[in-house]
Amino acid sequence: MKKIAILGSTGSIGTQTLDVVRNNPDLTVVALAAGSSVEKMEGQIREFRPQVACMWTEEAAADLRSRVADLPVKIVAGMEGLLEIAVLPDAQVLVTAIVGMIGIRPTIAAIEAGKDIALANKETLVTAGHIIMPLAKKHGVSILPVDSEHSAIFQSLNGEPADKIAKIWLTASGGPFRGRTSKELAHIQVEDALKHPNWSMGRKITIDSSTLVNKGLEVIEAKWLFGVDLDRIRVVVHPQSVIHSMVEYVDGAIMAQLGTPDMRLPIQYALFYPDRRPMGGKKLDFFELGQMTFEKPDTDTFAGLKLAYQAATVGGSMPTVYNAANEKAVALFLNRRISYLEIPELIAGAMEQHKAIDNPGVDEILQTETAVYEYIEGKVND
Ligand code: NAD
Ligand code: MG
């Protein structure tokens, strides 16, 4: 029996993780956490019977507490609640399926408590990878990638050492606006950007996929997870999203992982690694697929990717600025307060005015986040 806790259980990754639990009776859910969806959380508690559940606000927690008063579940709230779940003695694996930098503290707490991490929350690694990776090594815990590209790289590596890697080829679908010009992007509306061609995901990551910021975050995520320098991580646009990423070795051999776009595979692989379990769902049919195509990413139109390489090259607190500026800009775009092209503009502006701090601690990372949020609010309210 493997006992897991899930942060972000009501979201896209969270609900697909629970699907994997449904299909594997030897997985038990001991804790769940979500932002504000009380009703969904009540349903999950009734089905999976965790010991602890967390809602972000006290009001939501109080509402949930009265709804599940008939069950022996402890309801907690806020960051304190997330931290309690992160270190829950019974949990062996923490699935970080929360969105944004809010995942940093719980992830660190879980590692210190010796939990393996099934990591979907890429923003945490982008901003605090220099803290998380050494800490995981120190505590002997595994960071198992859930992001499909990183799972593909992990599967293609299969234990080979980092010094045998010549390149990592990170595939990108190119998003819904592939092939468009900047002029054509000027009037993009929220609804257009929320239509991803191949994957159904949460709102924030769907916008990030359309701007290529998601791929930028994934480049930095790959650097930390696999210990590979930036100049050996290449992005290739592959609109069919069938090759989930590839590793090129020093002898020129390239290993790739292919499959239909279904996040339950990387989730299940992370939860049972190194075992492979049978999985339902549609399998890849090469005759139906016919062909696979590849393109260079257009980083002039989609500056989000170029800015990620710049942020990672500077290092220190700059990736935090890149990420925090994007989180804030995407929230403003979703609230229709800024236009689509202002997303990369605000990221570039925030990076330009920031003086990077070397090797920032968690407090400095979170202070940088606050400062970036204030900078952007100031810009938008000008
Ligand atoms: P989502 O928006 O669908 O779900 C986010 C979850 O986090 C929800 O359960 C929400 O209630 C919870 N949450 C938000 N704020 C919270 C808070 N303050 N406290 C507690 N819980 C909170 O997002 P998603 O698409 O599932 O993405 C989650 C993470 O996984 C992101 O970091 C994303 O980049 C990464 N990821 C997602 C996919 C995908 O297919 N969806 C693929 C790869 C990586
Ligand atoms: Mg991905």
Image (cartoon, helix red, strand yellow):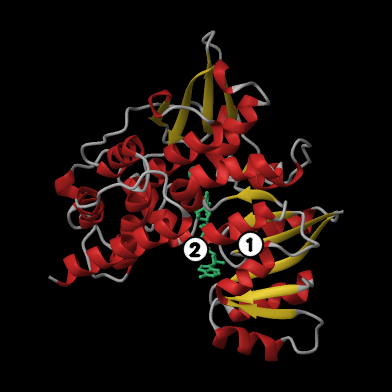
* Residue 228 location (% of width, % of height): 49, 27
> What residue is drawn where x is 37% and y is 62%?
367
Q: Secondary structure at mark 1?
A: helix
Q: Give the quarter of the image for residue 13.
A: bottom right
Query: Which residue is disc 1 drawn over?
Result: 15
Q: Position of residue 284 (x, y in %)?
A: 62, 34
Q: Amino acid at mark 2?
A: Ile
Q: Earlier along the polypeptide chain: callout 1 or callout 2?
A: 1
- Name the spot of residue 352 as percent of width and height, x first: 20, 48
Q: Is mark 2 within 8 Å of ligand 1?
A: yes
Mark 1: few/some/many CA within 10 Å (<14, 14-19, 20+)? some
Note whether 129 is above or below 195 in the view shown.
above
Q: Which residue is mark 2?
A: 102
Q: Residue at x 25, y 55 (%)?
A: 343
**Residue under the image location 42 percent in, 32 percent down:** 238
| Circle 1: residue type | Thr
